[in-house]
Structure formats: C-alpha cells, structure tokens
Amino acid sequence: MNSVYHVLQLKPYYQRMTDTFVPKSQDNSDDVQELPKRQRKPPGFYKDLSRGKVQVHTAAQSQGSSNFTRNFKKDKYEISQITNTLFLSGVHAIDFQKIKELGITTIINVTTHIPEWKFKGIKCYKFPVKDDPKEDISVYFDSAADIIRSVRAKKGKTLVHCHAGISRSTSLCIAYLMKYKRKGLMQAYRHIRGRRSIIRPNPGFLSQLVHFQDHLIQSSRVRG
C-alpha cells in the first residue's frame, strides 16, 4: 500500500478532521491546557499522511524523515506527559522507579507481544492490538477513555503504551481527548503531537477515529 493510496483513502475525511469539534461532554473539568507544548508548532497533519505507512521509518530520505529518526531516538526512552494525569510512551521507556516518581497508578498496555505488567500497587490493563491498519482498535476507544477518566476522578494517573508510543497508544489517547475533553480529532492530534513529536497513528486507526468522532457528535445530538 503506497503513500498516494493513504492520502486518497483519508482525503474524504480530512475536512471533518480539521474543522469538526466534539460537543460539550459531561466532564466539565479540564487539565488539558495546563501543560506547555514541547514544540511551538507541530508539522502539518495532511503532510504527515503523505509520508506513507507509519513505521520506523520507510519514507524517502528527506528533512522530515531525518527529523523523525532524530526525535524517535530521543523519545524512545521518554514517558511523554499529555495532560496532568495522562502519559504516553513506548515499551522501552517503562521503568518502575520512573513510573512511581511520576505518580502513575494505572497502565494500559496496547500490544499483543508485551505481557501484562506486574508492578506492585499499579493497576494494569491489556488491550491486545496489532499496529495494522486492518486491525479494529475502535472496540477499545470507549473502554480506554472511561478507564483514563475514572483514574483521574480518583486522583490517579494513567500511562498508555504500545511498542514505540507512535500509533496504537496515541490512538487511544486521542479517543480520550475527544470523548472527555471536547477536542475534535485534529485538535486532539495536534495537542499530543505538541508533546510527543513522533506520533503517527496508522491510516486505518485514523479512519476509525474519524468514525468515532462522528459517533460522539451524533450521540450528543440525540441526547440534546
């Protein structure tokens, strides 16, 4: 599947991803805006889609590719803070001492090959998802968002991780921001990208997030 196909596949959704915002949720509190962004302006989302399949890193040699490689090496061992109570990382960043220092009380593992963590005092969930555009990650959008919100309500903090902290875990964090923080897909993406520059949900997951956004908007209209 080439990069041109990816762009054409998602082009019908692009305007909705950019301009549509999820109506007000029941969660009126907001810890999203309290953190400074790590970079002033994240690169264009549509441009990112044209770079091809989300992997490390099969795109042609370019400045964007070089930046991604450099940022990946830097972020590989980092736990990125998305909100005051939500963190995102790859598996290489997970260290019990670091987790305790950050006050993380819950871990959501979004891989098929990493066993469920057995950290004392840490609640762990495992959502077995492959980083494949054909994989149905949407079945976990509501569950993950509800867990993150519940942990926050109990004054805890959640870490969501996959193998590299690029696609699967990012998709679940976006779903949370959309469902409970009133952010549209593009806004949620840019918020996370400003705090972890290497995120790149694969096109299949992005398409599912668009449908999730549509579902949230429709549900809000029905309730209203």
Image (cartoon, rainbow, N blue to C red):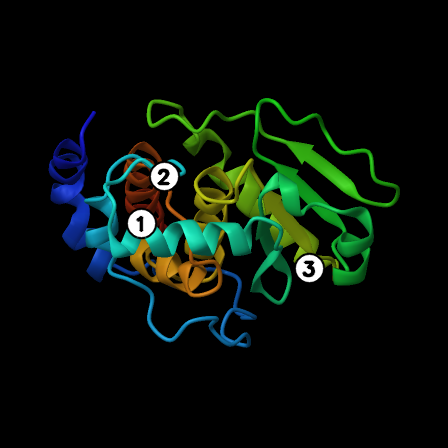
Q: What residue does disc 3 label?
A: 153
Query: Mark 2: which amino acid?
Result: His
- Secondary structure at badge 2 equals loop
Q: Is residue 110 left or right of residue 9?
A: right
Q: Mark 3 or 2 closer to N-term?
A: 2
User: Quadrant where the N terminus lies?
Assistant: top left
Q: Residue at x 48, y 64 (%)?
A: 195
Is the residue under label 1 in contact with that under label 3 (CB below 8 Å)? no
Examine the rendered structure and indicate whether residue 113 appears above or below residue 194.
Answer: above
Q: What residue does disc 2 label?
A: 57
- Disc 3 or disc 2, which is closer to the eye? 2
Is the residue under label 2 in contact with that under label 3 (CB below 8 Å)? no
Query: Mark 3: which amino acid?
Result: Ala
Q: What residue does disc 1 label?
A: 65
Query: Circle 2: is it few (<14), some (14-19), or many (20+) Cα within 10 Å?
Result: some
How far apart, in angstroms, are the residues tagged by discs 3 and 2? 38 Å
How far apart, in angstroms, are the residues tagged by discs 2 and 1? 7 Å
Q: Name which quarter of the figure residue 63 lies in.
A: bottom left
In the rendering, at what x and y percent does residue 211 appear?
29, 39
